[in-house]
Amino acid sequence: MTRIVMKFGGTSVADIDRIRNVAQRVKREVEHGNQVAVVVSAMAGVTNQLVKYCTDLSPLHDAREYDAVVATGEQVTSGLLAIALQDLGIDARSWQGWQIPLRTDRAHSKARIQEIPGAELIRRMETGQVAIVAGFQGLADDNRITTLGRGGSDTSAVALAAALKADRCDIYTDVDGVYTTDPRIVPQARKLAKITYEEMLELASVGAKVLQTRSVELAMNERVRVRVLSSFTDALPGEDTGTLVVDEDEIVEKENVAGIAYSRDDAKFTLRRVPDRPGIAACIFGALADQNVNVDMIVQNISADGTTDMTFTVGKADLPRARQALADVKGQIAYGELQEDPNVAKISVVGVGMRSHAGVANTMFRALADKAINIQVISTSEIKVSVLIAAEYTELAVRALHTAYGLDAN
């Protein structure tokens, strides 16, 4: 008997008809003799509306109350799916994060999972009951509801699969796998049969929307076998459907570049005329960390007059908190000017083949130069090169790079 976790995103449960479709998929797995747990997101658009309610009332709202509000979307979906399954004659029960309980830290709106006691769920699954778990949410040690950040249902699913010692975790979404880039921008994009944990982690971290970053990190650490599938096709999961996220040693031929990702979710800050002395960077980024603001790309330019310009990016959702944190330390740092630019895009090329092939970065820079696209910031890792450009050139840059690396489908 196979134990699986099935996760369905917001578009897969967008309305009652789609919830019925999900119920039929779950029923098929049960009828194949599998033990099944299901993790669901909120119905498409619901979380955005709940977030808007909070931000309209107060841009600097209490994150604990924000979590209490936005966690309700998944509660509704899990209950509806349980009803749909019961109507099909399947024994099913909904579970909220606090009922398991899915334990997290206290970083509200972006909490990290600490523990999932799976014994009770396993016991019920072994009797044939389907567990419908509300994704995206958990419970802190002070018994306040927490949420895991946008896309957190993927993390919930992978963590649950690890806790339940599941044989696989199937992530159902509105695409039928992982592509070399966004097919809406590049129609010639190819679906990948397999991709490494490392490549998927990098792609997720720089803008690919298929899987959430922490879910891939968790899958890699726990060696959870993950498959990305479409909830809008009739095919049952098999070796020839979707995209498998696997260990690097399962992929024999490693391409220099596996994919091109982009993100318009970042904003750029530049601090002008910052005193060039020890401790300044710690003061700036410590203030941002205290507000739970994640900083991504960083570049520093030293001037001849003893000051420096410091440029870095944060998520657009963190703009109000970042702005406030930087204003609070201005007297302490005595920087000259704060410049803010939300109209930027991050473009990244990712591939484990970069480890053994030179010239990947040069190909990127040359392709962008040929299109007269200016690079504002550059950052690299062992298998990734990212650049920050003006947002208006996003699609042009993605298409140019996809062709430059020979990723276009024949």
Image: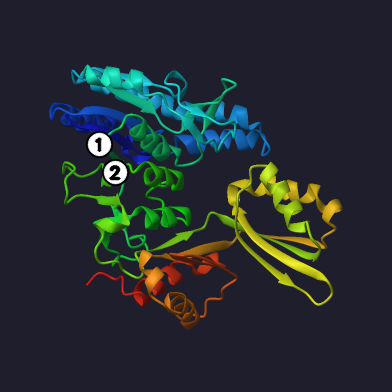
- In the image, what residue type sits under mark 2? Arg
Depicted 85 relative to depicted 325: above or below: above
- In the image, what residue type sits under mark 1? Asp
Q: Residues within 10 Å of mark 2 (few under 14, many from 20)?
A: many
Task: Decide which of 45, 116 is in the foreground and name it.
Answer: 116
Q: Residues within 10 Å of mark 1 (few under 14, many from 20)?
A: some
- Percent position (x, y) of residue 134? 40, 28
Quarter of the picture containing the C terminus is bottom left
Q: Residue at x 48, y 57 (%)?
A: 206
Depicted 354 relative to depicted 26: above or below: below
Label 1: which secondary element: loop
Quarter of the picture containing the N terminus is top left
Q: Residue at x 24, y 43 (%)?
A: 232
Label 2: which secondary element: loop
Q: Which residue is mark 1?
A: 167
Residue 225's disc number: 2
Residue 91 shows up from this direction: yes
Q: How many marks?
A: 2
Estimate the spatial distance between the alpha carbons at disc 2 and disc 1, rounded to whole Å: 7 Å
Q: Residue at x 43, y 46 (%)?
A: 217
Task: Decide which of 175, 45 is in the foreground and name it.
Answer: 175
In the image, taking residue 162 as reference, residue 301 lies left or right, namely: right
In the image, taking residue 9 as reference, residue 275 lies left or right, namely: right
- Percent position (x, y) of residue 161? 33, 34
Depicted 216 relative to depicted 309: above or below: above
First in sequence: mark 2 vs mark 1:
1
- Dots 2, 1 in contact, CB < 8 A: yes
Task: Decide which of 236, 22 is in the foreground and name it.
Answer: 236
